[in-house]
Amino acid sequence: MILRLVLGSLVARALTVGLTVLSIAVSVALFLAVEKVRTGAKDSFADTISDTDLIIGARSGAVQLLLYSVFRIGTPTNNMTWESYEEIAGHPAIDWIVPISLGDSHGQFRVMGTTNAFFERYRYRGGRPLRFEQGAAIDDLFDAVIGADVARSMGYQIGQSIIVSHGIASFSDHEDTPFRVAGILEMTGTPVDRTVIVSLEGIEAIHVDWQGGGRRPGAATPESTLRQMSLEPDAITAAFVGVSSRLELFSLQRWINTYPEEALMAVLPGVALQELWQVAGIAETALIGVSAMVIAASILGMMAVTFASLNERRREMAIWRAMGARPRSIVALLLGEAVLTATAGVAAGMVLLYAALAIVRPWIDAAFGLWLPIDWPATREMLVMLAVLGGAAAASLLPAWRAYRLSLADGMMVKT
Amino acid sequence: MTDVTFRWPGRPGFALTVPAFAMAKGDAVMIVGDSGSGKSTLLSLICGTLRAASGSLHVAGTDLGRLSAAERDRFRADRIGVIFQQFNLLPYGSVRDNILLPLVFSPKRRGRATDVDAEVLRLCTAMGLEPEVIGMSAGRLSVGQQQRVAVARALIGQPELVVADEPTSALDQRAQTGFLDLLFEQMQVAGSSLLLVSHDTRLGRRFDRVERIEEIALTERKAA
């Protein structure tokens, strides 16, 4: 019956209580959304590359190697020689190895030379393979496979002829040796979407007439000659490796890290990803801080509303007192109201979040390749919601204390 | 009440002294006084929301001076039914919930009203209220109806004493008569004592005794 009366009291003040509930709901939804995007981004980030055991490149930093080999950010400081690559590829612990060669670009996108094994071995988001939306893998020297973002933003179709530029953000084009779009990959939400993939030989072929940063003077080597040439590369940028047995992973890594002929390094993608995420973690903390403050603001708002309502509710409290309620019961009443309001707010916030998530999720996945799971709130989110309830109860103590003083002074007689 | 004095803490200008005041069980006593004459303070003392500074104050055989604040609240819930001038009811609660409210704080009165719904119905009918009213929200009732619900609430579980503070002043002349008729009738049935405060001397002839506040209580009032 008390609960019924408290609910009745809340319903009677539907407008202010409703707005309070709404403000808590919005703030909780915001917080949970930030939390979802954060964990979603983190997972999706960690899912950029999977099922690859080691990434091998010239010795630099683990994060740097990861950045240029997987995220195609920054430029490699050094290459590794083809001889080293071949020797490593022959190591018995290696199950598969995919070389990549970076350095050229097409518009805003990087061009990566590799072998067809890349399409087979590269996995993302828990072991998902790359799939062709149209066309197929590289078949010819001048075939290119493009990522979904490249295809969409440039409007490319299968058969389109594209010119690769020398270096990154440069004005010198390999205009004598155009590539033909042979395949378009499905959206993955990984940097593959923003990559033009060609064969290692293709990369070599377009550089036959080039030396350093410029084109060698003289006539261009005709295409037919290029096709006759041996196009084995001198060096590659990095290589992705799968081991035959996880047990040999660390000994292989040590062997590569101490490779005597060349300064190489092998990193575990998971470890490097984590290291990299810590850098991005600052923005994440800021986001959480801001949304926590929004929650705090909405609780303060509730406190202000409760304070404002106290005076007009003195009569109501006098009735409770006359019926034998102790001043302490009045405090409990206000506390109960606050917790009920906050609970309604948290529940509404959850509904808001999941409804919004259900609506925008496909769109977010398509636009950003970010898959936000709809699942039960994690322990951490549960704790946050409990904290909201606790905060609401704590915040109501101040007005409740004032109500206590008022009801002690007023007793049953409200002097107005 | 013997030699009861009361001072508002922190307000030295006002003090109330009651040399002697008593009423017998089952009596209906009216105290007449203008507003500001100390009536409310007197009622608060009797109901135990204020505590006397000195003297002895017995209500229904209990020395209120010996009780803690919590015990006085419990005592009020058990022994006293209260009727205000107006705004007696929680407007958002149903009439039923309003009438049953004192029972929440007093298991003793709850025990006396064996079948609560039957008791609510009986009291409402006795106070001339339609049974349909019971489920209605109290805020939708007229002032006259609300005052009658307040009587039903004061009487549920048969408290020893009913304290009424100007219960008729919000009613018009004809409604006042009807209201008092019903009030007295039900006081009789319940066997409770009635202490009613009013400025309206015309109500006096129905009571066993009428006292003027100036005669039972001395109020000091110094200019602050």
Image (cartoon, rainbow, N blue to C red):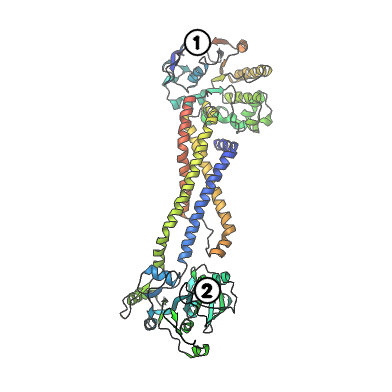
The residue to which callout 1 is attached is B216
The correct choice, above or below, for A238 with respect to B173 in the image is below
The correct choice, above or below, for A354 with respect to A94 in the image is above
Assess disc 2: are there few (<14), some (14-19) or many (≥20) residues with their C-alpha within 10 Å of its C-alpha. Answer: some
Q: Of A114 and A37, which appears nearest the observer?
A: A114
Q: Residue furthest front?
A: A217
Give the quarter of the image for residue A7: top right
The residue to which callout 2 is attached is A130
Q: CA distance from mark 2 to mark 1?
A: 98 Å
> Residue placed at 55% from the left, 61% from the top?
A364
The correct choice, above or below, for A251 with respect to A321 in the image is below
Q: Secondary structure at mark 1?
A: helix
Q: Secondary structure at mark 2?
A: loop
Residue A365 position within the rendered picture, expressed as x and y whole percent measured from the top left:
55, 63
Q: Chain of mark 1?
A: B
Q: Chain of mark 2?
A: A
Name the mark nearer the viewer: 2 or 1: 2
The correct choice, above or below, for B191 with respect to A123 in the image is above
Q: Of A328 and A392, which appears nearest the observer?
A: A392
Say what amino acid the circle numbered 2 marks: Leu
Say what amino acid the circle numbered 1 marks: Ile
Tag 2 and tag 1, C-beta contact below 8 Å:
no
Q: Answer yes or no: is residue B115 visible.
A: no
Residue A149 position within the rendered picture, expressed as x and y whole percent measured from the top left:
54, 69
